[in-house]
Image (spheres, rainbow, N blue to C red):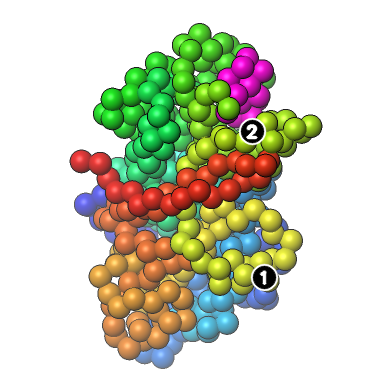
Amino acid sequence: MRQAMRFKTIAVVTGVMLLGAACGSSDNGGASAEGSSGGAGGGNAKAEPLKLGYVLPETGDLAYLGPPQIQAMKYAVSEINKSGGVLGSPIPAVVGGDEAGDQAIASQSADRVLNEGVDAVIGAAASGMSLAIIDKITGAGVVQCSGSNTAPTFTDYKDGGYYFRTAPSDALQGPVLADVITGDGHSKVAIVARADDYGKGLADATAKSLESSGASVVLNESYDPKATNFNATVAKVVAQKPDAVVVVAFEEGKQIIKGLMEKGLTPDKVGIYGADGLRSEDLPKLVNAKNPQALDGMKGTAPASADNPAFTKNLKAFAPDLEELQFAPQVYDCVNVIALAAEAAKSTDAASFKEQMVAVTKDGEKCNSFADCKKLLDAGKDIDYDGASGPLDFVDAGEPGKATIEVYSYKDGKLKTLDTREAAPVE
């Protein structure tokens, strides 16, 4: 991720912005920009418009995360433009592409977005999809910000200082998940996880914390998420006779959980745990459509958002059909941090405003909206943007240095929040 070395990059050449984003229309007309510098912001001259793109899931296993992230991004843009835009220019219609749970498609989408001359890209949602496009985006001198990448891989990734995330690393989530498991009295734990950076990263962080607390990890097995059945994985878990099972998965996890329950490993007999990839209102019905209550007692953890009813109310007013909200606050914060960094740098050139991305999230005067933060910047003050997802306080790596983790469960076939816990790096 962030490196001590900073690179000077060529300015991104901007072109005419496509009017239509992949999901719905924008409040702005097809504002276009000419020139190549991104604007220096001097005097009263307007900078070139800040141009945004996205690569987010519109199809595939994480399609349920597409609407909240895309709508949160559009909502942030609409609020910024109501406040006069960035450096006096409205953000044009956002151009987007589908990550689709497929690296080849995500790469093609990134190409299309980059060809529109964007200054920053929101996404991807999945860590694996971001890893498929990060070199392409950051190598082009374009800022990338994800609201849901949690794989520890990104912390030290060599991205030239262009990659950021508002979701915490699984290095912070793993210890909380382990603490929930041991707190429930379990000591013989089997872990099965997707064979990708997200799955392996969270599985290893959880296993390390479990073992340091005295629990025994009897299985830490990865599986091919594209497999057609998971009988072999289920059999390995059953053979170990654990008193708790952790499933680090996306939608395919429903098949694993269903298989475990068919073998007698039900939540009323052993601990069944998941993480953010399985946190879904629909999971009980996906596991057992006829009896969603069969999943009652399953628990999990996920990056939490601050208790922010005003944001939830306003986002739902902006997008009335929105049901799932997971990672919406984090994506909203990505857009605001980018916009505020451009204001602080007095430039929409990514090579300039990337240097302000960390600074606008800490060690300044508190503010929690683009409009309020902009007023402080205009007054020559340093700012500390506290976002819709909570205080960000980016470390040099361009990610939250601490996090609030939600503990969730299922009761009466419905998703419930049990608790939130603060997490910080384990020394």
Residue nearest the observer in this picture, 245 or 382: 245
Q: Residue at x 52, y 61 (%)?
A: 329
Label tally: 2
Q: Is residue 137 above or below residue 25?
A: above
Q: Position of residue 216 (x, y in %)?
A: 34, 20
- Check the image and name the residue furthest to the top: 239
Front residue of 356 and 251:
251
Answer whether residue 265 is magenta in the image: yes
Place of residue 273 in the rendered image (x, y in percent of width and height, measured from the top left):
51, 32
Could you tell me which residue is drawn at 43 percent across and 82 percent down? 372
Of the two numbered discs 2 and 1 on the same chain, state the one appearing first in sequence. 2
Q: Depth-wise, is mark 2 or mark 1 nearer the camera?
A: 2
Tell which of 161 and 310 is nearer to you. 310
The magenta span reads 253-267
Q: Nearer the viewer, residue 37 or 60?
A: 60
In the picture of the structure, the residue carrying the numbered disc 1 is 318
- Name the residue: 30% across, 78% down: 365
Q: Which amino acid lies under the numbered mark 1 shown in the image of this protein?
A: Phe
The residue located at (33%, 24%) in the rendering is 215
Asked if the residue under mark 1 is in contact with the one under mark 2, i.e. CB atoms within 8 Å, the reply is no
Q: CA distance from mark 2 to mark 1?
A: 33 Å
Residue 401 x %, y %? 30, 53
Say what amino acid the circle numbered 2 marks: Leu
The residue to which callout 2 is attached is: 295
**Mark 2 secondary-structure assignment:** helix
Q: Residue furthest bottom?
A: 44
